[in-house]
Image (tube, coloured by chain):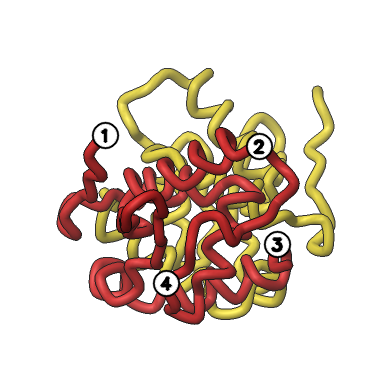
Chain colours: A red, B yellow
Amino acid sequence: MRGLDHPPIGGIDLVTVLDALADPVRLGIVALLADGDERPCVSFEFGITAASMSHHFRVLRVAGLTRTRQDGRHRWITLRRNELDARFPGLLAPLLAAAWADHGT
Amino acid sequence: MRGLDHPPIGGIDLVTVLDALADPVRLGIVALLADGDERPCVSFEFGITAASMSHHFRVLRVAGLTRTRQDGRHRWITLRRNELDARFPGLLAPLLAAAWADHGT
């Protein structure tokens, strides 16, 4: 099994974060995580293949936006809300609101 | 001369905006425009060719982030600050602050 690497907060880059968010599915995932709850990866339904969803989860994780936890055969995902708020003060709340308005489900 | 089209505020899409900003030069341009002043396009110096700068200005304009004004042989650029604030409430200020912190010059 591949390891699940997460970049340290100081290594989170604004360009990479914006690039990771510049996708309707990934914005939708992040909007659904905005409440702070950890969710099972299988619970997200965007009408695309599991492989495509895995790709999107990976992009979000590598960019530093989310934390993925392996639990047996299942993966759970959370937004790195507090760390992102520390790194980019005030950015996440209006971004999530805009994401929810445009891409919430 | 090509016309300078600007999308109406209602047509500004979050994914397109984020994609346009996911570039260090374009973040740098936007950070320099954060004060609201209109600036001559030739005043931006990022150590890249004029053709590359034109490309970046075009991406920002087409995404709805900036307004470009032709004045004889010169072009001037401003951030569509008020319109963007209306379209994505609260988003621009922290984004510009983060852009300035990471990519200001």
Q: Which residue is mark 1?
A: A2
Q: Is residue A21 visible in this depiction of the protein?
A: yes
SS class, disc 3 = helix
Q: Is residue B99 visible in this depiction of the protein?
A: no
> Do marks 4 and 1 share a subunit?
yes
- Identified by mark 1, the residue type is Arg
Mark 1 nearby-residue class (10 Å; few <14, some 14–19, many ≥20):
few
Q: Is residue B68 left or right of residue A66?
A: right
Q: Which residue is mark 2?
A: A49
Q: Is residue A9 left or right of residue B29?
A: left
- As drawn, A29 above or below A73: below
Judge by depth and name the residue closer to the eye, A68 or B58: A68
Residue at x 37% of width, y 59% of height: A66
- Identified by mark 2, the residue type is Thr
Q: Mark 3 near mark 4, Cβ–Cβ under 8 Å?
A: no
The part of the image, by quadrant, that contains residue A43 is bottom right
User: Mark 1 or 3, which is nearer the eye?
Assistant: 1
Q: Is residue B37 left or right of residue B14?
A: left
Judge by depth and name the residue closer to the eye, B99 or B48: B99
Q: Which residue is mark 3?
A: A103
SS class, disc 1 = loop
- What mark, if any, has residue A38 been given in the picture? 4
